[in-house]
Image (cartoon, helix red, strand yellow):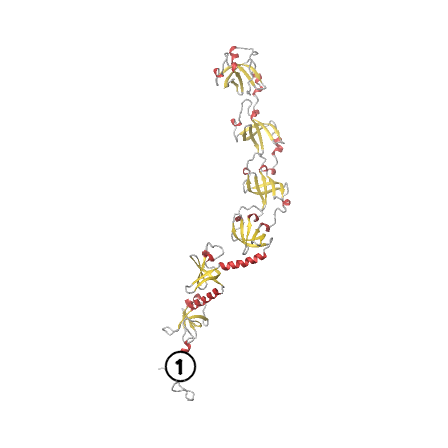
Amino acid sequence: MEKEMPVDLSDDNDIDVENAPTVDEEIERLYADTLKGFKEGEIVKGHIVKIDQDSVVVDIGFKSEGRILKSEFPNHGRNLKIGDEITVSLERVENKDGQVVLSKEKADKVRVWDDIIKAYRNNEPMEGTVVARIKGGLTIDIGLKAFLPGSQIDLKPIRNLDSLIGQKFRMRIIKLDKKKGNIVLSRRILLDEERKVSRDNILSTLEEGKIIEGTVKNITEYGAFIDLGGIDGLLHITDMSWGRVSHPSEIFAVGDKAKVMILKFDRNNQKVSLGYKQITPDPWAKIEEKYAVGVKVRGKVVSITDYGAFIELENGIEGLIHVSELSWNKYLKHPSKIVAIGDTAEAVVLNIDKEKKKISLSMKQVESNPWITVEEKYAVGAIVEGKIRNLTDFGAFVELEEGIDGLIHISDFSWTQKIKHPSEILKKRDKIKAVVLSVDKENERLALGIKQLTPDPWEVVSEKYRIGMDVKGRIVKVTNFGAFAELENGIEGLIHISQLNSKKIKDPTEAVSVGDEINAKVIKVDIPNKRIALSIKAYNEGLDNFEGIDIPEIEGIE
């Protein structure tokens, strides 16, 4: 039974004894006064008075203390200490155990919603962390889960959204529905605003000739677009390097930082032309000092055309070796026969055109002209050896060495054989011997002969074949005017149709055929024209005097 409090009756005028409250009534009144200041669902402040293994005890100034699980606190309440002030939600005034029910999580959510609503109304950005990739965009933690659509992540599409997980961004709330718990964010809006401010700042400072740093935004076949901080400029491929550039990707990649020069700026249309090579000196400025005419230079073959090869002497400096200057060989058809891309070549500077930025080079002049000493190496009458380089209707070209060719005219193939085309006895790449007939150093011509390797059989014909002499031969050819008989290798005689038979015949085939062995008399010897006339008729009739024999001249016989 509860003990009643003693009552002081010393002053009867101040106390109504009959109506004075009991102790229990006074306590109930005090509790009632305390409850008047708290409402369920209200956010209140309290102090931690005790920390247990799984929970903390919080005093909010109520008749009882409340207990909150540590799981409701960040880091599972590891950083909490007694006396800390925290904000909580009053869930229930009293549970079945007579204790007040508190929640840290709900208080945080209410506070976060208040902050989110305030930011939304004031159009203020909020910071959030990417926690997951979902269909159509990303889930962002801004204290509550919010949605960032893919189209609102950046100014340009992001291919790999997974790479953004864990990153923090500043975003603006563009849609809010507290009842449904929907929050939609946009990062792109802030980037657009920042870009506009940056663009305005850049535009106010841009001027031709100024050097500025930018970021490579995009690469095309003809150049690269550089983000200067809110405005894009075009860096054309021709302004990337003083040297040869086949594609912009040889120098830049998307995302690269690059210092560029403002070449042209159209403020009205906001178009900017940029230069990268212009930051460095033009190598052609002092070209004549570095590459004087006559100087030997070395470079890399960077391009080959039908008319020559381009040699890179240094970055931005290329020289052309015309096909005629690649070799002393006048018959070189294509530069690729001498050089290949990537080769290192040595050449002599022939000419410099600074205005047109052209340098003419020569590879062949690194070596001496072989025709200077041709008379010493290939004297007239000397026997030489070479390779058939080419055949033509009029003869064959023989390569004796690099740059030195000799011509064997078709008339110098054989003393006796009638050659219509060199291919009858020669073919390309054959190795042959020949005799030097003449040397023309000034015109770079050298004449050769094959038949001169052996004596001319006609030089002794007058001694061997005298008029009236009986000879034997073999028919090797029959024509409409007679037949040719071979007396020995390279020596043939003509038997006119009138001398084939004692009887008059209309067709030589009536008397002889190819392959027939015949006996005849020599009736005429013409050494200058290399002709011998024979007569089967004179042989058969035993004639010794041929003055009466009339042999007509036949045109076309060589």
Give the image quarter of residue 368.
Answer: top right
Label 1 element class: helix
Which corner quadrant holds the C terminus? Answer: top right
Q: Residues within 10 Å of mark 1 (few under 14, many from 20)?
A: few
Which corner quadrant holds the N terminus? Answer: bottom left
Give the image quarter of residue 91.
Answer: bottom left
Most distant residue in the left direction: 1
Q: Position of residue 502 (x, y in %)?
A: 50, 11
- The residue lying toward the viewer, choosing from 308 and 267, is 267
| Residue identified by numbered label 1 | 26
Q: Is residue 468 left or right of residue 72?
A: right
Q: Position of residue 404 (x, y in %)?
A: 58, 32
Q: Residue at x 61, y 29 (%)?
A: 439
Q: Position of residue 28 (x, y in %)?
A: 39, 79
Q: Is residue 53 visible?
A: no
Q: Is residue 289 visible?
A: yes
- Where is 465 relative to 172, above or below? above
Q: Residue at x 49, y 59 (%)?
A: 189
Q: Position of residue 477 (x, y in %)?
A: 50, 19
- Where is 338 relative to 240, above or below? above
Amino acid type shown at disc 1: Glu
